[in-house]
Image (cartoon, rainbow, N blue to C red):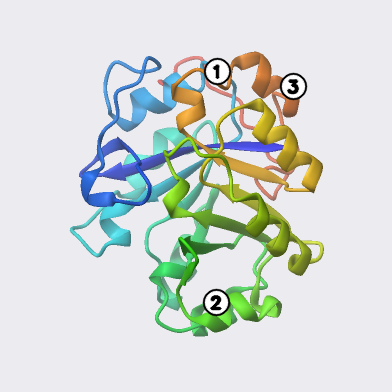
Amino acid sequence: MLIIPVLDIKDGLVVRASMGNREAYRPIETPLSPTAELADVAAGLRTLHPFPAFYVADLDRIEGRGKGTTLNQLQPLLSVANIWLDAGFTEPHELTKILEVDGVWPVLGSESQARRSTLEAFHANPNLVLSLDFRGDDFLGPQSILEETGLWPSRVIVMTLSRIGAISGPDFDRLAEIKRRAGTRDIIAAGGVRNLDDLKRLEAMGIAGALVATGLHNGQLTTQAIASLMASETPGADGKGRKAVPSPHSRF
């Protein structure tokens, strides 16, 4: 099972997410890092495990506020891991540009879409990830994106915003339903993962991976727990068989 640490970025710093209430997000305080700087937090997470991929949510771009994070700022992290990047992509030219960057998988968040045309144009690309975003029982985005499974790419995140940082457990029922409809696609759980028991239950359901933050920072997911679910090198975790090997001189 692929465990993907989450780095939510707001105003240039990693923040602690809380039930999708982004206005209340504040710079993270974690025993894994002395600061909320991206490099420090990522380095702290990699002391737990040499994760082959990180999920980065550029909240400034998602909310249409400011310039957000640049690829130059992400480059040190790209030297040791792949990045699943949600930066509020909506237009075809944005995806065309980001798909040319080695090691970056663009995440097309349903909440950012006003129409389904961009997904239609790129859904067959093997590096595209779709995030089906929910707030409570409400789907965020064009209903056709949720209903027409033929538009889904090979990897689909099921994001339950109200469970993020809430330590309430994943939305198992919704995940089971999406998994049933998804066929052979990989389903990635996001929101509410607390501990090893949650991850084992997701694995038993056939869920391919999970986006995790709180459980890593509060110590519920230890090095041993992570290693019991995923190998230190995960072939194919980046879609290209690339292995993320840290440089001895890297901050990560």
Is residue 202 visible to the viewer in this orientation of the structure? Answer: yes
Q: Describe residue 41's horizontal placement relative to residue 48 as left or right.
A: left
**Helix, strand, or loop for circle 3?**
helix
Q: Please give the label number shown on residue 48.
A: 1
Position above or below: 223 against 141:
above
- Write the residue at 37% across / 63% down: 88
Amino acid at dot 3: Ser
- Write the residue at 31% across / 53% down: 59
**Helix, strand, or loop for circle 1?**
loop
Q: Nearer the viewer, residue 216 or 47?
A: 216
Position above or below: 35 against 117:
above
Front position among marks 1 and 3: 3
Dot 1 alpha-carbon crowd within 10 angstroms: few under 14, some 14 to 19, many 20 or more: some
Residue 15 in the image: state x and y as whole percent.
30, 37
Amino acid at dot 1: Leu
Amino acid at dot 2: Leu
Q: Which residue is mark 2?
A: 119
Position above or below: 223 against 133:
above
Q: Please give the label number shown on residue 228.
A: 3
C-alpha distance separating marks 1 and 3: 13 Å
Dot 2 alpha-carbon crowd within 10 angstroms: few under 14, some 14 to 19, many 20 or more: many
Position above or below: 41 against 136:
above
**Helix, strand, or loop for circle 2?**
helix
Q: Nearer the viewer, residue 195 or 148?
A: 195
- Write the residue at 67% across / 19% down: 225
- Write the residue at 58% across / 57% down: 158
Label 2 vs 3, first from the N-terminus? 2
Report which quarter residue 150 is drawn in. Answer: bottom right
Residue 1 in the image: state x and y as whole percent.
73, 37
